[in-house]
Image (cartoon, coloured by chain):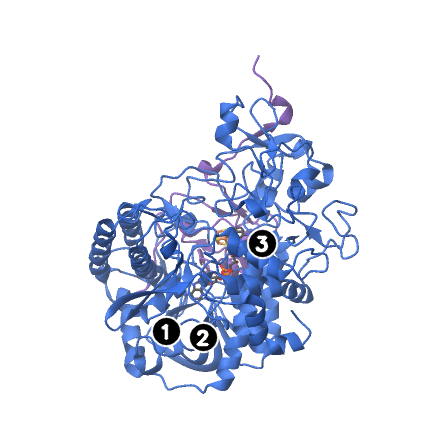
Amino acid sequence: MHDAVEWPYPVEWDKTEEIDTDVLVIGGGASGCFAAMGAASRGARVVLWEKAATMTSGAMGSGCDHWEMAATNPCSHVTPEELADAMIRGHRGYNNGISHYIEARESYDRLLDLERYGAKIRDTDDEFKGADFRDDETKFMFAYDYVNRFTLRVWGTTFKRAMYRGAKIMRAQVVDRTMGAGLLTEGGRMGARVVGAVAINGRTGKFTVCRAKAVVFCMSRPTRLWLFAPGATGISEFRPPQCTGDGHAMAWRVGGSFTMLEKSLRGEWSGLRSFPPYSTGNNHNTWYACTMIDAEGRQIPWLDRDGNELKTVAERYRPAPGQKFYMKGGGEPDFPFYEFQGPETMPVEEAVKRGYKLPFYADLTSMPETERRVIWGMMVGNEGKTRTPVYAAYNKAGFDPSRDALQSYGDGWRSGQFLPQERQFFGIPGGMVNDWRLMTNLEGLFAAGDVLFASDCVGHAAATGHYAGRHAADYAAAHGSVALHQPQVEAERARLFGPLKRHSGLSWQALAEAITRVMQNYCGAVKSDDLLHEGLRGLEDLKEASKSLVARNPHDLLRAQETLNVLTNAELVIHSCLARKASSHQLQFVRLDYPEMDPPEWHRFVTVWKDESGVRNGSLPIDYYGSLTENYERHNQDYIRQGRA
Amino acid sequence: MTRVLAIPDQAIVDPITIFPEVCTGCNLCLHVCPVDLFLPNAEKGGPPLVLYPGECWYEGSCVDICPEPGAIVLNRPPAMRVNWKPRAECRPRS
Ligand SMILES: Cc1cc2nc3c(=O)[nH]c(=O)nc-3n(C[C@H](O)[C@H](O)[C@H](O)COP(=O)(O)OP(=O)(O)OC[C@H]3O[C@@H](n4cnc5c(N)ncnc54)[C@H](O)[C@@H]3O)c2cc1C
Ligand code: SF4
């Protein structure tokens, strides 16, 4: 452990930099890099702010192994309409029809972009020639449903660099170590057009004020609301630690509208209590459809959606008799819908009842050779957080997939056990409301990737990023820039740099821990108006306490501001829960005071936002986006004319 | 102005070991680390300092980019050691 050291970077927190651009993208992960490329493709001047380092940042910065919903790839047997419909009905309507249709229509285009920028998307080395999951003509490799071929296996460790390269080649000005920290609106008013933003540099503390004709939010989703790991804060959640849902907090402060944030799941992966994703024996995602055995070496049966036992490995990758296609196995938390459900092993509880002995293991040894190699090698090896910490580390420690069985530590793909109040945004949680341009309710503010409600996945982030970038550029071209409201800039400066002015007080870690306590106690597995109001009071106390939050250098200042954003997001989530006066199975939302599950009059999106008078709520019909094909085509004539989509 | 200091965080994990005899101090790990866990060494060519170990995300970007094999190692936390054994040993206890 080091002693304290002198801050090595120039200290510039008393400096202000002013810049001006057409489109400002905040967040340089998958969606942000593509937003920059999309906006630049329409001739806009683009600035991209990234809190970390764009070359490696974001959820898939170190890799990914699936590219989902690529309905327009030449081997696919499903249409974008079919896939979007499955996404929507599979979630009983609680899904973002617009963004998932864009994903189905354009994510394959984005994959080709990546290839152009140096990513590997085909088995060009012919390592898997002749395998069931490979198309020998295009050399594309598929996962899950080998008949319908719309989810690709990809060499995702090459992807983030290609995205970074693409953004630079398209002449976006990429600025790293810069945290977007606040939005600026026309006249400084809530709910008005977004005309710029402010940022803090995490090394120097420099304050940047940007005037922009349009802003695209690409900062992913809130984390650390219920889960925090003191002493190992970087793995408090599954998502990267620097992704704290800053965009949500920034938008909420100035009147942005959100939906579905009442939905949260019991913890799946987090902290030191669960093992790193994909690093233990399981049969989901990266490991689908691996054979599982019990402690005595007996195979756990694989079942089709009707409970019929499958006799061969090949059958796990085919739809059931009479089923057109399947999306994923039945065991994933967000995908229980019969019509699109794929094969799955017998639930652990049932298997134990039938005498199978714990612990279970993933058994690659008995998988066909190409399946074994594609899982242990290509997939574990290209998935995020696997190449170095799992693939290389286990190989070095002697793990041999043709000899060894890897232990499993939870049911399904979980690798740890959580209490009911230890919740998480996982699968497709809530987020910002969008229209067909991916513009939010705030004029000039666009959103992409996991900022959007009901979003998930790399292909979705890439497709919606590019799309939001194009529409932001069009908006910028049609609207001039607006002078900034200086009192708002000064208020932001005062708010943001406060923690540096104090010499002692609350640490960001103590505040972070306290927020999760309030959320677990009052916004846990069961909710009621009384509990939620108690939670709001608890957050008010923490707001008061946070006035003594202290930061000693720019690094700590970023952590402090992130934690204040988590506090704001906690408030946003509690208001979202208060606004839905009904329980919902699909939203995993249980109200003690409104116990009836899914009453039909509540089958709609509940929206929440703030205006000058306080917190407001409203609602949108569950199919508010209308006809997918017609609306998409109406809004994207240029793109279609260029021969894409 | 008061002195600006970097104070190490209170970590219960020890994610990174840098071997100073192999490290050339190129600072590439420091450039790609998403959480800015490292700080540059005040001595030119010296290995980066691990200042915020508790903030590590354990994704391995620093190791992936390092041009000197063995200069930097990512240590799995003891609570995350995973078991495996030869398939042949999964058999009924006699
Ligand atoms: C380990 C792992 C593996 C995954 N594997 C797959 C897979 O194989 N297939 C798949 O489809 N999906 C996968 N996912 C999900 C997928 O990676 C995400 O859904 C997707 O990357 C989201 O993209 P995004 O652009 O919305 O967010 P991110 O890619 O996370 O990017 C958000 C960016 O915003 C930056 N940022 C945050 N706050 C600020 C701020 N205030 N100012 C400036 N910048 C900020 C962050 O540093 C980050 O770079 C995986 C996720 C993880 C964590
Ligand atoms: S593993 Fe990632 S977060 Fe940890 S030190 Fe390396 S680059 Fe930083």
* Mark 3 to mark 1 CA distance (whole Å): 31 Å
In the displayed structure image, the side of residue B8 where residue A427 appears, left or right: right
* Mark 2 to mark 1 CA distance (whole Å): 9 Å
Residue at mark 3: chain: A
Tell me, yes or no, whether the two marked residues, 3 and 1, touch with CB atoms within 8 Å: no
Task: Assign a secondary structure to mark 2.
Answer: strand
Of residues A434 and A233, the one nearer the viewer is A434
- Chain B shade in the render: purple
Instruction: Assess disc 2: are there few (<14), some (14-19) or many (≥20) residues with their C-alpha within 10 Å of its C-alpha.
Output: many
**Type of amino acid at the residue the image marks with label 2:** Val
Instruction: Establish if A45 lies above or below A114.
Output: below
- Chain A shade in the render: blue
Mark 3 beta carbon near ligand 1 (under 8 Å)? yes
In the displayed structure image, the side of residue A277 where residue A315 appears, left or right: right
Q: Which residue is mark 1?
A: A183
Instruction: Assess disc 1: are there few (<14), some (14-19) or many (≥20) residues with their C-alpha within 10 Å of its C-alpha.
Output: many
Q: Which residue is mark 2?
A: A215
Badge 3 and badge 1 in a common chain:
yes
Q: Which residue is mark 3?
A: A63
Task: Assign a secondary structure to mark 1.
Answer: strand
- Quick one: label 2 or label 1, which is nearer the N terminus? 1
Of residues A63 and A309, the one nearer the viewer is A309
**Type of amino acid at the residue the image marks with label 1:** Leu
- Quick one: label 2 or label 3, which is nearer the N terminus? 3
**Type of amino acid at the residue the image marks with label 3:** Gly
Choose top left, top right, bottom left or bottom right for residue A217: bottom left
Q: Position of residue A537 (x, y in %)?
A: 20, 55
Residue plotted at (47% across, 81% down): A21
- Quick one: label 3 or label 1, which is nearer the N terminus? 3
Residue depth check, mark 3 versus mark 1: number of the one nearer the observer:
1
Q: Position of residue A145 (x, y in %)?
A: 65, 47
* Mark 2 to mark 3 CA distance (whole Å): 27 Å
